[in-house]
Image (cartoon, helix red, strand yellow):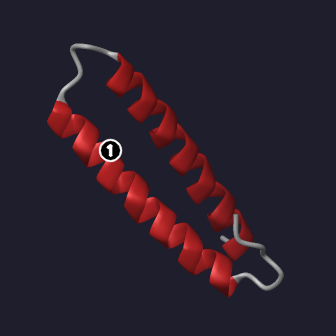
């Protein structure tokens, strides 16, 4: 898997988690611990995305 492909996959997972978090927060019956865990995973993905972006020549930071 190329770094560019890996970056695209990480960004896709990040967007999915962001949507899942928004949906969970909007739901009054959501589990706070689950939301915290999803936010932690989202942060880890963001950090990995930044590391990969630094390794991909010409990739701009968002």
| Residue 36, placed above or below residue 61 | above
Q: Residue furthest right?
A: 58
Q: Residue at x 44, y 29 (%)?
A: 22
Q: Residue at x 46, y 61 (%)?
A: 45
The image shows residue 51 at horizontal and vertical percentages of 55, 79
- Most distant residue in the top direction: 28
Decide: is 41 above or below 23.
below
- Name the quarter where the C terminus is drawn: bottom right
> Label 1: how many residues lie within 10 Å, few (<14), some (14-19) or many (20+)?
some
Task: Report the residue at 70% width, 71% height from top.
Answer: 61
Q: Is residue 9 left or right of residue 48?
A: right
Q: Is residue 36 left or right of residue 49?
A: left
Using residue 59 as the reference point, say whether residue 49 is left or right of it: left
In percent of width and height, residue 38 lies at 32, 44
User: What is the quadrant of the N terminus in the image?
Assistant: bottom right
Is residue 2 among the parts visible in the rendering? no
**Residue name at image x 83 percent, y 81 percent:** 58
Q: Is residue 46 above or below residue 39?
A: below
Q: Name the residue tied to disc 1.
A: 38
Q: Relative to residue 57, is residue 49 depicted above or below?
A: above
36 sits to left or right of 33: right
* Residue 41 visible in the shown view: yes
Q: Secondary structure at mark 1?
A: helix
Tell me residue 40's x, y (percent).
30, 55
Tally of numbered tags: 1
Judging depth in this view, the residue of 44 and 26 nearest the camera is 26
């Amino acid at each position: 898997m190329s770094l560019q492909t890996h970056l695209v996959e990480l960004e896709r997972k990040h967007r999915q988690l962001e949507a899942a978090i928004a949906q969970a927060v909007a739901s009054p019956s959501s589990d706070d611990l689950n939301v915290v865990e999803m936010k932690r995973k989202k942060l880890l993905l963001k950090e990995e995305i930044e590391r990969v972006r630094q390794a991909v020549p010409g990739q701009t930071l968002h």
